[in-house]
Image (spheres, grey):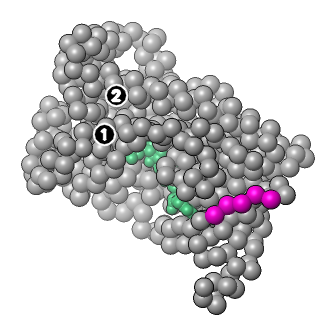
Amino acid sequence: MTADEELRMDETTQDEVIVVGGGMVGAALAALLGEAGISVTVLDARPAPLASDEVGRGLPAPRVSALTPVSQRLLTHLGAWSWMAERRVSPYQGMRVWDGEGSGEIAFEAVDIGLRELGHIVENDIVLAGLETRLAALPSVTQRYGARVSGIAREDETQTLTLDDGSRWTAPLVVAADGARSPLRRLAGIEVREHDTGHVALVTTLRCEQAHGGVARQVFLPDGPLAFLPLRVDEDDHHCSIVWSTRPEHAEKLLALSPEAFAQALGDAMEGRLGKLDVLDKVHHFPLTQRHARDYTAPGLALIGDAAHSIHPLAGQGVNLGFLDAAVLAEEIIHARQRGVALGDARTLARYARRRRGDNAAMLALMDGFRLLFGARHPALRLIRNVGLSSTDKLMPLKRIMIRQAAGERGELPAVCR
Ligand SMILES: Cc1cc2nc3c(=O)[nH]c(=O)nc-3n(C[C@H](O)[C@H](O)[C@H](O)COP(=O)(O)OP(=O)(O)OC[C@H]3O[C@@H](n4cnc5c(N)ncnc54)[C@H](O)[C@@H]3O)c2cc1C
């Protein structure tokens, strides 16, 4: 051990709440608690915050999220949305979903439920930089970068975290927001139900010959869904971010193609609906594993966001569910504190888990259902899904319910999302 490390072993920093992982979800929770005057430290392994003056310039970053109006309300409440909107957010008013192996198709329009838009496609870096900017302005929030948590121990109602530089951090409540592979979840011994979806997601940015018209498109192909998410770049609506979920063998073949051949394969899969395509970025790939933690809480510990659940991106729900976790947990903590209840109290954490687990589990099951139904090659199932899509398209009341669900308008929403 170096002298520096030995010195850090003696350093112990205390706070009221420690959030491990300052990604989009952890940052949102810290901002909500910070706004209520609760003293929070965010520990993140990344070396530094995002360079906020660089995000949202030039070619869109490859990782984007479809944000629901409910998430938009949370980000607006936090003052992050106006910051993001000044950089780049791309509203979409319509959605088309069809079966690549048949004639079934369904169209959704925001006006059908009296909304201006169904949601926005936003680069993850813009969301995160907006939240980091908000955090920097909150006096009760401390952000620490290059802080990799490598141990957790509990004693006398207090959690002690150890970082890999040897320093120690203590708080009565620790929140794991450290992503799908959550090291903290593993260190705390919380089991996770995990299954490989059999899909890899290919992600890139392209320019389409035809304007997307503010419509998100998704075709269900035999090997998995392909989504075209509309982006608005300098008033131009010809850019899209794509997420192509497919079998690993197929993904490997697609990754070996030249950009021109990849664009051709994409155009064919999309039935040429947006004309000729130009691939503008490298093709990035992500394995898709669904995970659900068996418990969302342990004494003095709560899991939120991808640390609690990671979900197939076919309905663009992952970070939206995470924002709801953050908003509900913050609401429970703030209410408990107003009643003089200690931070980390077991009943407060249990209420959070009760309010969020069912919604997340239902969404995970729905994504599995979609994936299996649209991956099925049996002629009877193909007929059912095509007839199902086309008949649902004609049933406006049912469509309205589906749009509201996808927009996040379900169950009892936390006040900051209403
Ligand atoms: C291809 C693809 C497309 C997607 N599209 C959508 C979409 O359209 N809409 C949507 O809602 N969701 C979408 N998602 C899901 C979404 O990206 C995730 O749900 C979201 O990023 C999770 O955020 P998070 O803050 O929980 O975790 P993360 O973003 O993973 O953040 C975790 C943070 O923890 C930090 N960390 C990790 N380990 C440690 C440690 N030991 N110590 C300290 N810090 C640590 C990391 O540095 C990181 O900053 C998509 C996902 C994929 C793969």
> Mark 1 or 2 closer to N-term?
1
At a point 55% along the width and 48% down the height, the residue shown is: 307
Residue 11, by quadrant, is: bottom right
Which element is circle 2 on? Answer: helix
Instruction: Indicate which disc residue 254 carries.
Output: none
Which amino acid, by three-letter code, is at mark 2? Arg
**Which residue corresponds to the image point at 29% horizontal and 24% vertical from the top-left?**
374
Callout 1 environment at 10 Å: few (<14), some (14 to 19), or many (20+)? Answer: many
Which is more toward the observer, 52 or 355? 355
Name, please, the residue furthest toward the right: 340
Residue 288 horizontal/vertical position (percent):
37, 43
Q: Quadrant of the C terminus?
A: top right
Span shown in magenta: 151-155
Label disc, if present, on residue 199 of the rendered structure: 1
Q: Residue 29's spot in the image, x, y percent?
A: 65, 51
Real-space Cα distance between discs 1 and 2?
Answer: 10 Å
The reply to whether dot 1 and dot 2 touch (C-beta < 8 Å) is yes
The location of residue 36, given as percent across then percent down, is 77, 52
| Image side of residue 224 versus residue 68, left or right | left
* Residue 144 makes an appearance in the image: no
- Disc 1 marks a residue whose amino acid type is His
- The percent coordinates of residue 350 (x first, y second) are 74, 37
In the rendered image, residue 218 lying in the magenta stretch gets the answer no
Residue 215: quarter of image: top left
For the point 19% across and 18% down, the residue is 102
Query: Which corner quadrant holds the N terminus?
Result: bottom right
Locate residue 329 relative to residue 392 in the image: left or right: right
- SS at mark 1 in the image: strand
* Numbered badge on residue 371: 2
* Residue 157 visible at all: yes
- Residue 144 lies, with reference to residue 121, above or below; the image says below
Say above or below: 49 vs 82. below
